[in-house]
Each structure stands twice: as C-alpha cells, then as structure tokens.
Image (spheres, rainbow, N blue to C red):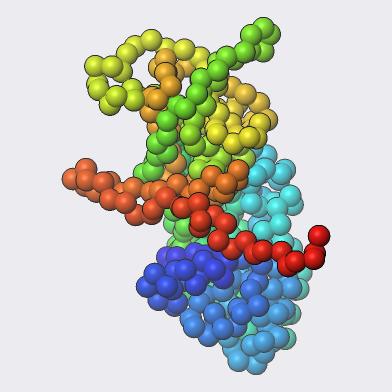
C-alpha cells in the first residue's frame, strides 16, 4: 500500500526522500493548512473527523475530488488492554478513542450528506483499531468496515490499518496473519458477490510487524547502585533511556534485555545472574527500562547476567516506535546515532550522533531590556 503519513511534515519528508506524492497517504489528527496543496500534488488524504471532511469539501466543492474517510468502528484492540471499548494507550478504536469519524455518523446520514453537498468522490474507507492480536475482533471490524464501503459505489479500497502485535519476549503472542487474514479474505469475496462483482483492494499497514525485531538499542552500564531495606533494589544505570526508547516509560512495554561483557570477549560472558531494575540516564523517575508489564508506574526486577560498570546492554525489539518516538534532547541528551548492519554483517552509519550545537541551534537570544 502507499506509505502512510500522519503529518504534513512526514509527507514533505517522504517526498524529499524520493517517494512520489501519488504513492503517499495522509491520515492526520491535525489537518494541515496546506492540505489542498498536498492533495494537488497527488497525496491521498483520509478525512479523520467531520470538520476535516467539511474543510476538505469546502475547498474542493463541485470538483469531484477523491477523498478517503477514516472511521472509528466502535471497538479497539489495544496490546496492553483486554477491553475493546475502554481507554488504552495502544487502543485506537472505540468510544475512548479520538481517532477517526464515529461510525454512527456514517449510518445516520451525516457523512453522506457532506459528501453529496460538496460533490466529493469517496475512494477509500480507512480503519485502525490498535495493536491487539484477537482475530475475532479483526474479523468483526473488517465486516463492519465493508458495510461502510457499500455506502459509496466509488470506493475502490479498504484500509484496515496496522497494529499487528509482535511478541518481543518468550511466550508473547505474535499476530498470525494467516489466522486473521483468511476470514477477512472470505469477507472481501462475499462483498464482491453481493455487489455485482465489485472487488475492493485491501490495504494494510504492517510497519511494526516487519521491523520491530529488526532494531536494537545498544548501550552501556555507566553506573550501578543499590538501596537497602524493604522495597530495595539493585539498579543498573544506562547511558541511554527514554531519550532513545520511550515504550517502557509510556506503555509499560517489556523489551528483551541482554548483558554482554564490555571487553567483547566471549569467555568473559559469565554465568552468574542477579535481579536488577534497569533505568535510563535522565533525571526523571519515569525513565524506567524494566517496568511491570503494561504498568509504566511500577518497577519490575529482571534477572540478568551479573553486570559491571562498562558492560554492554542490548535492548532488542527496538525497531519500531522507538527512535521516532523518543524524548530526545530531554536533559540535553543528543539524538543517538543509528547503524545499519547489512547481510554480510558490515556496519554502516545511517544517522550521525547529534552534536551539542544542533541541540540548541534554534534558541534565540532574548532582546536586551526584556528582563
């Protein structure tokens, strides 16, 4: 499917990297002021609210301009929540989610009336419910989404989003694409039979599924401290943290962690283990790398190889929602470098470490006399 973006800056970034505008879709919480210019370039825009659809229609009134509609189908599937309707940071469907147009506005005539008023051409329905892995929920959402496609005979594609769960740790489920895909494919065939042979294109967004396990944060134990008494712990302090991987602090996400000798020698790996809490380098109590599963406010000890200052810490499963979502520059820590390892095992620098000057280069001196 076309690369999906969520801001005009991502659109501009994709274009500057050589991606043709007509191959880019935009579903955004903040409709950019220059959305019309982006659409004229060929961007496929999905209206994510009633007001976005109105603004789009007002600009392109009477032109038959193509538009997609992102629908909140009424349920979600969050990886850190068993609820399909309650709030979860990884649940992006249901009444507790702000993403998309509420499904009842599709069926009560609100959306169709706007489309008719401005003479728009709806070419796509887009839904996205979160990062859960329950195939029954995916099937039910696909069926409901197909019912929205029946409302406009101009629709050629149904985008069911992404969020396919990746099991980063032993025992964690990974979405079985065959299990969730087979019944969805059946529903698409049923749709075609019911609608005179009209076949829809299925679009998905499997970014995390493809790259989550392709990246790792490599850091160093820069300090080791212990407390005493009830509730005491041994802490490993890294030279990285929420400035590089925010998922543990934000979601209570659990990443695999491996301790390796700083010397790099295999015979120094050792077999002694200890239970530790791993924390980042920020002056922030929430800079926690080993939370309770799904509980970012709770410490959890992890049994790891006994570490010494200078040892290497590898946090796997850091290929998605990590570098791009990090709180870089907090405490003035720079954006970390990124290294790509090719098929032959050769390392290539693909992003340099941010310099101190780059951190504060946009700061402006206050005019004399302000204070």
| Count of all numbered marks drawn on residues in the image | 0
Residue 34, x across and y down, in percent:
61, 80
Q: Compared to 78, does 102 lie above or below?
A: below
Farthest left residue? 344
Query: Which quadrant of the figure contains the C terminus?
Result: bottom right
Q: Residue at x 21, y 43 (%)?
A: 345
Left-right relation of 98 to 34: right
Q: Residue at x 39, y 53 (%)?
A: 352
Q: Residue at x 71, y 57 (%)?
A: 98
* Foreground of the two, 214 or 210: 214
Residue 33, x across and y down, in percent:
65, 78
Q: Residue at x 60, y 52 (%)?
A: 129
Left-right relation of 135 to 92: left
Q: Compared to 159, does 220 lie above or below?
A: above
Farthest bottom residue? 62
Residue 115, x across and y down, in percent:
68, 81
Q: Compared to 188, does 281 lie above or below?
A: above
* Foreground of the two, 305 or 141: 305
**Visible residue check, residue 145:** no
Quadrant housing residue 299: top right
Query: Which quadrant of the figure contains the N terminus?
Result: bottom left
Residue 242, x across and y down, in percent:
56, 40
* Foreground of the two, 112 or 363: 363
Farthest top residue? 229
Q: Compared to 60, does 28 lie above or below?
A: above
**Visible residue check, residue 205:** yes
């Amino acid at each position: 499917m076309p690369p999906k973006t969520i801001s005009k800056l991502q659109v501009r970034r994709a274009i500057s990297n050589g991606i043709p505008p007509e191959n880019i879709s935009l579903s955004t919480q903040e409709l950019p002021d220059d959305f019309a210019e982006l659409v004229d370039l060929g961007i496929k825009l999905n209206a994510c609210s009633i007001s976005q659809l109105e603004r789009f229609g007002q600009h392109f009134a009477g032109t038959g301009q193509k538009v997609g509609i992102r629908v909140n189908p009424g349920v979600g599937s969050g990886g850190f929540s068993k609820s399909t309707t309650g709030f979860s940071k990884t649940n992006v469907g249901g009444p507790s989610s702000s993403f998309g147009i509420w499904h009842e506005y599709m069926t009560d005539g609100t959306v169709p009336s706007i489309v008719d008023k401005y003479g728009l051409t709806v070419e796509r329905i887009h839904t996205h419910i979160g990062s859960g892995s329950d195939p029954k929920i995916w099937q039910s959402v696909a069926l409901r989404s197909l019912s929205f496609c029946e409302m406009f005979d101009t629709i050629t594609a149904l985008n069911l989003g992404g969020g396919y769960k990746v099991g980063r740790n032993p025992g964690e489920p990974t979405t079985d694409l065959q299990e969730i895909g087979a019944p969805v494919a059946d529903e698409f065939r049923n749709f075609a039979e019911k609608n005179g042979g009209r076949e829809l294109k299925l679009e998905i967004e499997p970014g995390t599924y493809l790259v989550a396990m392709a990246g790792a944060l490599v850091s160093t134990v820069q300090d080791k401290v212990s407390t005493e008494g009830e509730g005491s712990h041994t802490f490993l302090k890294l030279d990285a943290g929420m400035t590089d991987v925010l998922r543990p602090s934000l979601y209570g996400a659990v990443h695999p962690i491996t301790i390796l000798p700083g010397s790099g020698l295999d015979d120094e790996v050792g077999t002694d283990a200890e239970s530790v809490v791993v924390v980042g380098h920020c002056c922030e109590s929430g800079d926690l790398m080993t939370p309770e599963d799904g509980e970012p406010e709770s410490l959890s000890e992890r049994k790891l190889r006994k570490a010494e200052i200078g040892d290497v810490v590898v946090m796997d499963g850091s290929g998605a929602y990590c570098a791009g979502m990090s709180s870089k520059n907090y405490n003035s820590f720079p954006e970390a470098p990124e290294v790509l390892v090719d098929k032959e095992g050769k390392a290539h620098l693909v992003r340099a470490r941010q310099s101190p000057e780059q951190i504060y280069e946009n700061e402006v001196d206050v005019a004399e006399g302000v204070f």
